[in-house]
């Protein structure tokens, strides 16, 4: 994992130093582009050509729209659709080819035909993220929301900007693109706030998420070997793991960008404090949720349609979101269930208000809020089972165990004994990590970590930062190879 190696620890400070030493915006832009290409090539070098292909096609499409599509709507639409077809084609080939051939093989075998062997395709890191960001730009140009970028280096940097290249946030043109034309100055605020954000992101990834993954991977690798108690632990741990893993990357990306003077959008807003599934998706992976809203849900008609059509729009949007997350039917069902629950919540809102008023929950609003948060967390945990399971068989077994009854309370030592191959101290570390996350998220309900920590007196911050560094170095789990969302 690049973030977890000496290579990145050397790479990023050098980039920052050289970036601020360069005298003008143009040189800085070309340097950042070169650094971003080097960053991406450190994974699988040859896949830089896929990224360049998508970039060149979308750059050409946007400018051809402006040149030939002003008075010709058909040409304008063609120069929008053609690059999108190429982008989606790349996505379908690298991410979904084996998924579709698997479906064809299944029906072919049933009809007596030979199975199609799987293709040996290695998925380019973060292909969905940079293709969605580039497609968003194309659609914005088509709608007249932004002007096409004439400078190809600026556009390439918009697509390849290394802090958020491989796992987001999926930035919008109007937010990020203009920043490449500004001259940024090294400031204490950017350095301190960006550094804090990166530090907290590393704590979430290396200390919390990677320690939890030891238990999660063990159970999900062979779920039928474990009983109810271990299953419950794995299900809850995965909910926390994926949150810390993905939001940890986002925090590192946001912090790294801020150190260089760039402002990226917030991607997570304490999602496990949500009071409904609908609210959850306003707080989880915000850049993707708003992307689907603006480029799929609203074009389908959004909520300005009949109720049946709105239900259809909602379900379709979440089905596509599920497919975006992975080439497996478990992801599709996961997306469908989130869409269905969103529809149910919307259709039952008046009934729920009447029930709440009848039992006078409004008088004790904090009780109502607590119940709603618990409901949302439990539902998302159950749906994460589909997300994490390799097969429906594994998912059904785990769900069956979850609903077979509550686990028996036991001491930490007895609980640790359920996982024979994992040292007992890792369970202590995992529990401490969850408690730490809960404390920080409570403090960050109205702001992110970089600003929330400023409320802590200066004399107390240094011990906190020192503690975080110790947690990463001493108690971090370094067995994990990469961030979970690198595969998307």
Image: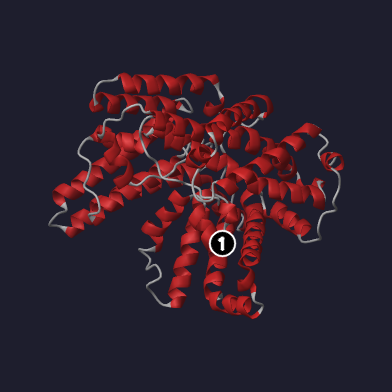
Q: Residues within 10 Å of mark 1 (few under 14, many from 20)?
A: many
Report x, y in % for residue 136. 34, 49
On the picture, is 242 further left or further right than 93?
right
Kindly tell me whether residue 89 is visible in this rendering. Answer: yes
Q: Quadrant of the N terminus?
A: top right
Report x, y in % for residue 114. 59, 48
Report x, y in % for residue 339. 53, 64
On the picture, is 222 further left or further right than 341?
right
Which residue is located at x 39 percent, y 23 percent?
16
Which colour assignment does the render follow?
secondary structure
Q: Up-down: is 348 above or below 105?
A: below
Q: Nearer the viewer, residue 234 or 88?
A: 234
Residue holding disc 1 = 277
- Find numbered disc 1 in the image and state the secondary structure of the residue it sits on: helix
Q: Nearer the viewer, residue 397 or 338?
A: 338
Name the outermost residue toward the left: 71
Q: Quadrant of residue 24?
A: top left
Which residue is located at x 46 percent, y 61 percent?
317
Kindly tell me whether residue 56 is visible in this rendering. Answer: no
Report x, y in % for residue 362. 60, 72
* Tally of marks: 1
Q: Nearer the viewer, residue 134 or 45?
A: 134
């Amino acid at each position: 994992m690049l973030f977890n190696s000496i290579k990145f620890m050397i790479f990023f400070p050098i980039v920052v130093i050289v970036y601020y030493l360069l005298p003008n915006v143009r040189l800085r832009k070309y340097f950042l582009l070169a650094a971003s290409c080097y960053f991406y090539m450190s994974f699988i070098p040859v896949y830089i050509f896929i990224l360049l292909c998508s970039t060149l096609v979308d750059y050409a499409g946007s400018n051809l729209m402006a040149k030939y599509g002003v008075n010709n709507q058909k040409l304008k639409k063609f120069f929008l659709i053609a690059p999108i077809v190429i982008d989606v084609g790349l996505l379908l080939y690298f991410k979904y080819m084996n998924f579709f051939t698997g479906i064809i093989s299944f029906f072919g075998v049933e009809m007596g035909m030979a199975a199609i062997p799987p293709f040996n395709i290695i998925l380019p890191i973060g292909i969905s993220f940079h293709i969605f960001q580039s497609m968003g730009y194309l659609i914005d140009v088509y709608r007249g929301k932004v002007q096409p970028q004439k400078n190809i280096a600026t556009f390439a940097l918009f697509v390849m900007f290394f802090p958020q290249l491989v796992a987001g946030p999926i930035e919008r043109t109007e937010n990020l693109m203009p920043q490449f034309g500004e001259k940024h100055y090294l400031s204490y605020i950017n350095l301190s706030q960006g550094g804090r954000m990166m530090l907290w992101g590393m704590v979430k990834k290396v200390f919390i998420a990677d320690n939890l993954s030891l238990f999660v991977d063990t159970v999900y690798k062979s779920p039928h070997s474990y009983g109810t108690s271990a299953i419950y632990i794995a299900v809850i741990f995965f909910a926390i793991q994926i949150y810390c893993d993905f939001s940890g990357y986002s925090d590192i990306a946001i912090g790294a960008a801020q150190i260089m003077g760039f402002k990226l959008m917030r991607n997570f807003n304490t999602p496990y404090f949500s009071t409904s599934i609908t609210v959850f998706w306003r707080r989880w992976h915000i850049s993707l949720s708003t992307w689907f809203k603006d480029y799929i849900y609203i074009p389908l008609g959004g909520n300005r349609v009949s109720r049946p059509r709105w239900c259809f729009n909602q379900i379709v949007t979440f089905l596509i979101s599920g497919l975006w997350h992975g080439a497996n039917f478990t992801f599709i069902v996961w997306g469908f269930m989130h869409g269905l629950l969103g529809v149910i919540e919307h259709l039952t809102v008046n009934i729920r208000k009447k029930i709440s008023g009848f039992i006078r929950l409004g008088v004790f609003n904090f009780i109502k809020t607590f119940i709603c948060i618990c409901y949302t967390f439990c539902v998302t945990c159950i749906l994460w089972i589909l997300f994490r399971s390799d097969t429906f068989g594994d998912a059904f077994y785990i769900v069956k165990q979850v609903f077979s009854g509550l686990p028996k309370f036991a001491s930490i030592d007895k609980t640790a004994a359920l996982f024979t191959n994992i040292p007992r101290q890792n369970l202590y570390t995992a529990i401490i990590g969850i408690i730490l996350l809960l404390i920080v998220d409570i403090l960050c309900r109205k702001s992110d970590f970089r600003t929330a920590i400023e409320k802590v007196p200066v004399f107390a911050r240094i011990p906190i930062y020192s503690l975080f560094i110790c947690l990463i170095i001493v108690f971090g789990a370094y067995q994990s190879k990469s961030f979970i969302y690198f595969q998307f």
